[in-house]
Amino acid sequence: MAEGKKLFSAENKAGDKFNYARKAFHLLGLFIPLGYFFTWLDPISPWVFKETTRSLIFWVTGIITVLFLIIELLRFNFKFWQDLFVKVVGPMLKGKELDKMHGSVPYILALCLVIGFFPRDIAILSILFLTFGDPAAALVGGKYGTIRFYNGKSLQGTLGGMAGAFLAGLLYLVVLSAFGAVSDYVLWDTYGIRLENWLMLFVGAVAALLIEFVSHEGFLDDNLTIPMGASLVMIGTHLLTTGHTWAVYFYDWRALLFPTN
């Protein structure tokens, strides 16, 4: 089949060659949390929101999600669109994505939701878990995965993904802590070690890859379930160890809609 030659893996079996093109695309997603952290979009906004960069990222990623859904609808109903889609993005596709929603749709939606509604540092951590934990699991599992489970994933890959997610999150929080950033999630401050945040990081990284283990292709792809699930787990862990209320962790949706003046 001519189309199959353009695909990374027609069968997408466990242990297939590491998909560098697909993972490189995910790495491009790091520009979004970086832009969010450094508020890169504030100077170009025609409006002044409570948090302009966050609001703009929410709307842009939301619009892209809708456009992607339209593309999916077209390609599943018209052969011309399917052939064009495979020709353009085939090297980044899994074989199963020929007749199922491709992973970019839940990926962009996840960016929209975690940045739109969760605390900044928890949102960024959850994106780092996906960006580094998922590829680490695939790479380790593909090379060293000898203990396989019912879904083809390996114990070695899952543990490798947990390590990758934890180290990526650790680096981010260490930088925040070392530079004295104003954040509720630093690992240490002038009062000492913040054990609740170390625990939050560890539990979040482990949960992210456990969620990846049970995720499926389609809309509930790990591109959506890892950021959303890990964010909620970290919020729950932090809440239980600090005594905060749930309201502290969720942004007011009205701040995404209305300028401050």
Image (tube, rainbow, N blue to C red):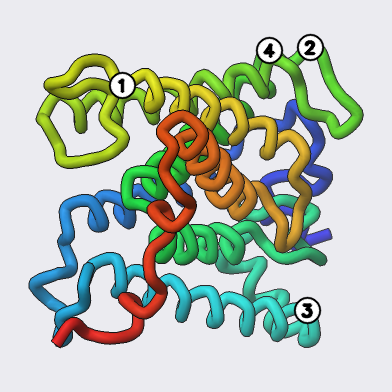
CA–CA distance between discs 4 and 1? 35 Å
As drawn, which residue projects farthest toward the right? 150
**Residue 144 marker:** 4
- Residue 243 screen position, x and y as percent: 44, 37
Residue where numbered disc 1 is placed: 194
Residue where numbered disc 2 is placed: 146
Under mark 4, the amino acid is Tyr
Under mark 2, the amino acid is Thr
Can you see residue 24? no
Q: Earlier in the sequence, mark 3 or mark 4?
A: 3
CA–CA distance between discs 4 and 2? 6 Å
Q: In the rendered image, which quarter contains the N terminus?
A: bottom right
**CB atoms of marks 3 and 2 within 8 Å:** no
- Regarding mark 4 in the picture, which secondary structure is present there? helix
Left or right? Give the position of 4 relative to 81.
right
Q: Earlier in the sequence, mark 3 or mark 2?
A: 3
Q: Residue drawn 74% across and 26% down?
A: 15
Under mark 3, the amino acid is Phe
